[in-house]
Amino acid sequence: MKKHYRILEYALSSLLRRKYKNLALFFIYTLIVCLLSSVMFLTHSLKQEAINVFIDAPELIVQRLLGGRHDLIPLSYVDTIKSFPGVATVTPRFWGYYYDSLTGGNYTVMALTSNASLNLITGRMPEEGECAVGKGVAQARQLDINDALFFTLASEQKLMLKVVGIFTANSSVLTNDLVIFDKNDVIRFFALDKAKATDLMVKINNESEIATVANKIKRTLPDTRPITRSEILRTYENVFNWRGGMALVLFCGALLAFFIFAWDKATGLSAEERQEIGILKAIGWETSDVLTLKFWESTVISFTSFLTGVILGYIHVFEFGGTIFVPILKGWSILFPPFDPMPYIDLYQIVVIFFLTVVPYLASTIIPSWKAAIADPDTIMRT
Amino acid sequence: MILHPGILALFIGEGLVIAMSLYASLLGVEVLRRWDINSSSEEQLRLERRTYLISTLMMYVMFYEVLSLFLYIYTLDSIHVIFVGAMCATGTLNANDIGWYALYIKIIVFFLSSSWIAINYLDNSAEDYPLVRAKYKLLLLITPFIVFCGFLLVKYFLGLKPDIITSCCGSLFSDESKKVSGSLAGLPIKAMMVTFYASATLLLPLIVLSITLRNSFLKYLTAVNSFAFFFISMLSIISFISIYFYELPMHHCPFDILQDTYGYVGYPLYSTLFTGVFFSLISGIVEPLKKIQSLTKTVERAQKMWLAISAIGIIAFVTISTWPIIFSSFKVDM
């Protein structure tokens, strides 16, 4: 143990003696780790955000398909579905998107349903002629209670609503783009068919029956598409895994270049370093000691760069919102809210970054270290 | 194929260790063929230098195997969400049988490569390198395992198909029949508890006796016992140790204890078990090496140290597993 401590001490001093060479390595190494960790952190928080959006989502959503595309669902389906054993409630939902030209963002306009888990900050939920807005929307439009909000689609479809409530939701996406109307206002504003809803929200008593009920709906009403919450979550998980993985695959080239660089650095010993090893061996160091020394050198470089890189990645993502990678990873172009990822560090992420960078780096320095360590002191000092 | 960062990391790592172990065996073959300790030719010097490279490579491979075992389980756990019905790593493993084999082979590779390091340590402490041939033969045995393990791992991950929403309808209707179950059935708790504590109380005195007495038979007996203890412990973790950590009588998963919800208790649990069992085993395995004159003293010294570590490991393991049984408010009707 003491021996390792001494060798580590020597390794540190020898690294410091070759400051500039090692600094160059440190910078590139840190940059690589920083990029990778940014991708990982960002993917993870986007995933988390998606989960937050859907954690309060109904167990089952039933949509109608027409020509392979989402269509309005007849309200007569409500009773059919309600008659299935195991179904607790069926609630039609009325919602749509509204492009707000003032802020240049999309709002989700939704009719008030009973189970929306929104936390009102002030005011109450709307009745006809009124609306409630998410905190983000309120900030963007500088709204307060009793202010009027104007919506317009075409000459016939326009609404002037009084803001009666401001709310937050578990997810910042919902907080930032949701506007709640009364049901009749939504129908009037979007000029919906009175006998139809956007989709149906099905509540099921027993969680393990969801798949069975979904199956039954699909069989009885073949023009519908039942989507379970777990399916949505699974799909999002995959989408973000794929996006993150894709970014990592793109980085593989950069990683490879870095490892070749590291290999090259470790191989190309200067005459001075060669002489140093020669002297060490001449004064009684064994080959294994020199190998240990080289191991400690690369470990010190690895861990310093790894930690710095992860910290920089953390700052990049959670302080600056991951500016560089948001466009690649987020995917939707005009999400109105500024995306503020929740600072969160998962041990697993760190381990994966470690495996992607430190493990190959240490591997790439083994053979060069050995080559340096076996050198014959006699030959070295003669040259 | 799922493009998950953890899977990519495992692919890169497996590729590296396969390349490294193949290279090490290639060098090892040459050492096996040409090794002659009495020669003072340049060839022999070259070979001796080469042994350093091989042992460094193997050291790296061993550390990788230890770490990647955890990364593998962790990755399985983190991708369980994308399979219908999977609740943790077990569910992911059930999604495709090969995953279990990859896990078993990984554990075997871990034990084999640690044994190699231990034997290498003994060999390097003797001046005439008496174990060179045995060592490199063992290396040639380990390499196929490493390659096979990497192959299984890649095959497993490539064979995984996530259940996602397809354009026509939810995926759940397409493969409802292939649902995976998320938990393992456990063995009867009481019987398993008796077996576990009986084998632990048998093993510990055996280890202590092996440290104090020079009897060869005892060393073998300890090794065999610790080998049995390993399996008994694994079954016990599934049967009753896990449920005390989860405080759920029906939850037998051996992987969930690695999660932060349970304070990462799985890591000390498994590492103490692996350490304890490995060091007893290796003390038995190296027993025949005592016959080699230049090794007798080293082996004896190493055995004492290893057995002591083993005893500490097993005591720690039993303590960690017993802790919630005694101190938690959770009680199981047996």
Image: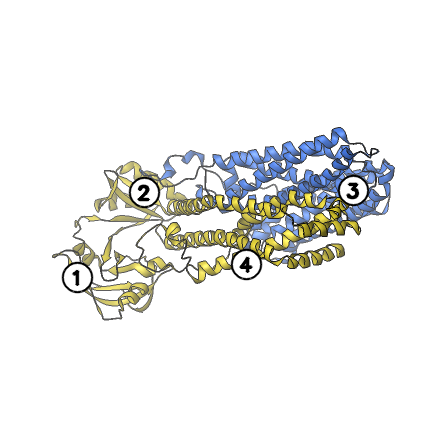
Chain colours: A yellow, B blue
Q: Amino acid at mark 1?
A: Leu
Residue closer to the observer: A147 or B26:
B26
Residue tagged by mark 3? B124
Q: Give the residue furthest to the front.
A: A383
Q: Are marks 1 and 3 in contact (CB under 8 Å)?
A: no
Q: Residue at x 57, y 42 (%)?
A: B13
Cα separation, mark 1 vs mark 3, equals 86 Å
Q: Are marks 3 and 2 on the same chain?
A: no
Q: Is residue A274 left or right of residue B127?
A: left
Residue A244 picture location, percent across and down: 44, 47
Q: Amino acid at mark 3?
A: Asn
Comparing marks 4 and 1, which lies closer to the viewer? 4
Question: Which disc, if any, is residue B214?
Answer: none
Amino acid type for the residue under numbered disc 2: Pro
Q: Is residue B51 above or below residue A283?
A: above
The x and y percentages for residue A66 are 23, 39
How far apart, in angstroms, are the residues tagged by discs 1 and 2? 33 Å
Q: Which residue is mark 4?
A: A308
Residue drawn at (79%, 44%) of the image? B206
Which chain does tag 2 point to?
A: A
* Residue A355 x/y as whole percent: 56, 47
User: In the rendered structure, the residue with mark 1 lies on which chain?
Assistant: A
Q: Which residue is mark 1?
A: A159
Distance (Cα) linking label 4 and label 2: 47 Å
SS label for mark 2:
strand
Residue A282 in picture, x, y percent from top left: 79, 50
Q: CA distance from mark 4 to mark 3?
A: 38 Å
Q: Earlier in the sequence, mark 4 or mark 1?
A: 1
